[in-house]
Image (cartoon, rainbow, N blue to C red):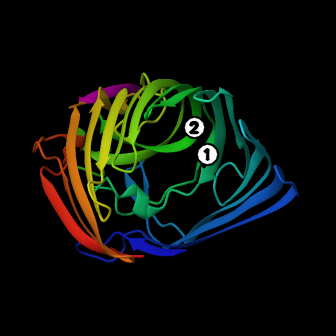
Amino acid sequence: GFSKSGIQLPDYDNGAKETSFFINLNAKYFIQDNLKVGADLGFDFASYNTLPSFDFDTWKYNARKHSSLGVASVSPFLRYQRENLLLQLGVNFDIAINSGSTFNVSPNVKADYNFTPGVGIFLDLKGGTRINHLWQMKALNRYINPTMCYKTSDVPLDIEAGFNLGAWQGFSAKIFGGFASYNSYMMPQYTQAAMIPASVYDFTEVDMRSAVFYRGMKLSGWKAGAELGYKYRSLVDAKARFTYSPQNDDEGCILGLDRPEYVIDANIAICPIDPLRVNIGYEMRGKRARYGTQIQNNGEDYWEAYKLNKVMNLKLGASYRVMPNLTVFVNAENLMNKQWDWFIGHGAQKLNIMGGAGIT
């Protein structure tokens, strides 16, 4: 694939610009009918224009040369599968180009075992290194710093395990728990500076709580949750999921850039006739906070957290397949017209409706 993105400044053309491409390949070989070996290969590359770099120590911009980032990944695996067992043993080897940690290793392990029909356990261990592309960083943050580019992020370990129950007469359930650790993971933060050099500004204090900066954080934490489902033929497919992870400064699993402690996500799809599909959804994100640092006059900093209001998003959508390769759709979000901030001062859209068509 290929993408090109950038941030245009109003008065002059020196915003950050990125040109990137990626390629993914995979290969596999069957040793036996239920045993195979394979490998997933990937390369992601991003090139940036020449632009200034902001120095928080001097509060001045310095010249920065043309730069680029790359991540090459090799993920060999061995997979064994039979009627009641799926086992995959693998590892991810990631080589980061022009970014901090050069060589990273993470697991690529999956296991799913059914004791009896409807009762089983599962395990998923994963990780990896990725580029923080500009289009990803500004997708939610419309007040992103227009001159900054970002290092790669590394997830050494992300593990989830639990029990699968069902389906019995259409009902199913899942109970899960997990742990994750993150290195240099780009999270939005505010910085409130108590003292700025007088040679730069003619005032001594500045409050930047509404200016979102991204900081590579080292985080780790656990999570737990449950999921319920119900399916009736092809007419109804419903799921509800609850996930909880306590958050505290640099602790917690990442459930989103707004760092909620719990997320409730419920969706139901109804197909009264074959070409028509209606979706109803509800999302709640609670105990959210924006974490950051308060810089003191002595140069030391300490953590602060600003609580964010709760997200309650009721959604409704419908799609209709006009022809085998043509589908029209309409989606509406925030039907209750609630107001919440993704970040401080970054209000989410109230009631919004979007429609269109898709060709496959």
Q: Quadrant of the N terminus?
A: bottom right
Relative to 288, 309 lies left or right: left
The image shows residue 78 at horizontal and vertical percentages of: 82, 48
Residue nearest the observer in this picture, 144 or 44: 44
Instruction: Please tell me whether residue 78 is drawn above or below residue 220 in the rendered image.
Output: below
Instruction: Please tell me whether residue 223 is drawn above or below residue 325 in the rendered image.
Output: above
Relative to 239, 350 lies left or right: left
Q: Quadrant of the C terminus?
A: bottom left
Q: Residue at x 44, y 69 (%)?
A: 51
Relative to 349, 196 lies left or right: right
Q: Residue at x 19, y 44 (%)?
A: 345
Q: Are marks 1 and 2 in contact (CB under 8 Å)?
A: yes
Q: Which residue is mark 2?
A: 182
Q: Which residue is mark 1?
A: 154
Query: The disc labelled 1 sits on which kind of residue?
Result: Asp
The image shows residue 130 at horizontal and vertical percentages of: 58, 54
Relative to 135, 87 lies left or right: right
Mark 2: give few (<14), some (14-19) or many (20+) Cα within 10 Å.
many
Q: CA distance from mark 1 to mark 2?
A: 6 Å
Q: Secondary structure at mark 2?
A: strand
Q: How many marks?
A: 2
Instruction: Write down the region rendered in magenta.
Output: 300-307
